[in-house]
Image (cartoon, rainbow, N blue to C red):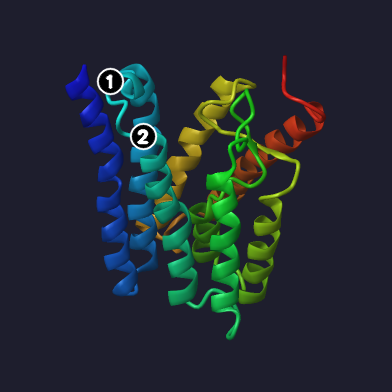
Amino acid sequence: MKQRAYLVHLLTASGLIPMMLSVDAIWRGDARLGLIWLGVAMIIDGLDGPLARRFEVAKHTPHIDGAILDHVIDFTGYCFLPALMIYHFELVPAGFAIIATSFLLMTSLYTFANRDAKTKENDFRGFPALWNIVVFYMIVFESGQGLNLAAIAFFGAMTFAPTRFIHPVRVVALRRLTIVLLAVWTFMVFAYLGLGRAALPPLMDWVFMALSVYFLALSGWRSWALRGGDEK
């Protein structure tokens, strides 16, 4: 079992490989490929947690803090590389790149340092620093620089808001439906990145946005329904 625990840690660490491939793509000016590699890293991140719990990694490798390992890698892929993309691809107005990316990174630090970042039901408290997804929307849907700057300011501020954002895999409410819709959403993300938005039917935009609204609406509903405390 100890060997399996080490393999899980190795899987977690391997997330840095697609992240470095993302850096290479960014350096070569290929934003879509950079996002694809960040998506691969996100899939690895989604697998290592269940495996760590399944094989009791904390018990068998007590000298390695898997949470810190995971946080370091997640901050790189979810925050630092998206900030690099915002800077490199000039996604905000001229003169605001350093301010916007510094604000993004500094607010994200609170998410990773906050011991109460999750509720008992595995909702996130405040915006969970999913900047790779925010940058995906910016690049694929070609939103304007001013709108992008406003989005960074908004989501950065939402890091500290008393609202819930669902964990689409671990949250209990409507879990089966949410997981199915997440699988469809993920497939569509890779379709946008692999084929390009222009090659896809316009109807896909409407379906994709409807799925996006579902996740936001579920988060909003839980924020309202569970205001004042966690579920019992």
Point 17% across, 23% down: residue: 3
Q: Residue 2 location in percent, x, y?
A: 21, 20
Is the residue 205 above or below the residue 162 in the image?
below
Is the residue 204 above or below the residue 144 in the image?
above
Q: Quadrant of residue 10?
A: top left
Extreme residue in the left direction: 3
Q: Is residue 4 visible?
A: yes
* Crowd around label 2: few <14 · some 14–19 · many ≥20 (10 Å): some
Point 56% across, 50% down: residue: 129
User: Going from the N terminus, do you reach mark 1 or mark 2 first?
Assistant: 1
Left or right? Give the position of 217 relative to 128.
right
Q: What's the mark number on residue 60?
A: 1
Name the amino acid, label 2: Gly
Left or right? Give the position of 29 relative to 182.
left
Q: For this rendering, which residue is in front, 129 or 38?
A: 129
Is the residue 18 above or below the residue 91 in the image?
above
Q: Residue 127 location in percent, x, y?
A: 64, 47
Q: What's the mark number on residue 21?
A: none
Callout 1: SS: helix
